[in-house]
Amino acid sequence: MEHLRFNRHEIFTQEDRTEVLDILSEVSREAYKQGKSRYDGNYASISNMLYGLFDGYLYFDLAIQSKDSLSDDLAKRVAKIWRKSYDFITANGESIKTV
């Protein structure tokens, strides 16, 4: 999976960390409504990529899979965090692209 590495301590505020945790909870709720768990299929992949943000991994597929699998509102929240991270990384040139 293609991703960028970054120092999340330089990007994320406390509000951003809380938002990622809240999004993870919402992913679990949406999966449950579909009779699944956040450990199933795309829900598992999205959850893993969201947890990766805490370790400084920004996966390119995160926003795409979220748009395809989550409610519009939740996908927009994921996209907002993704965009903030991506914009910071590209503006400050501090990432390592890994495939």
Image (cartoon, rainbow, N blue to C red):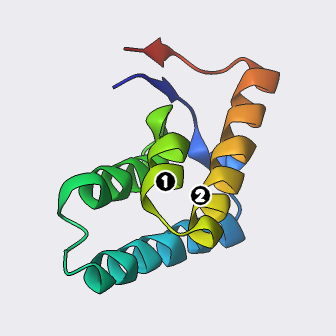
Image point (55%, 45%), residue name: 63
- Provide residue 99's location: percent of width, then percent of height: 37, 14
62 vs 29: above or below = above
Helix, strand or loop for disc 1: helix
Looking at the image, is mark 1 or mark 2 earlier in the sequence? 1
Instruction: Name the quadrant containing residue 93.
Output: top right
Image point (37%, 83%), residue name: 29
Image point (58%, 69%), residue name: 74
Q: Are marks 1 and 2 in contact (CB under 8 Å)?
A: yes
The residue that label 2 is drawn on is: 78
The residue that label 1 is drawn on is: 66
Helix, strand or loop for disc 2: helix
Q: Amino acid at mark 1?
A: Ser
Image point (68%, 34%), residue name: 86
Q: How many other residues sit within 10 Å of disc 2, few (<14), some (14-19) or many (≥20)?
A: many
Q: Quadrant of the N terminus?
A: top left
- Provide residue 48's location: percent of width, then percent of height: 31, 52
Q: Nearer the viewer, residue 61 or 93?
A: 61
Q: Nearer the viewer, residue 12 or 23?
A: 23
Q: Residue furthest right?
A: 91
Q: In the figure, is residue 86 to the left or right of 99?
A: right
Q: In the figure, is residue 76 to the left or right of 75?
A: right
Residue 16 is marked as none
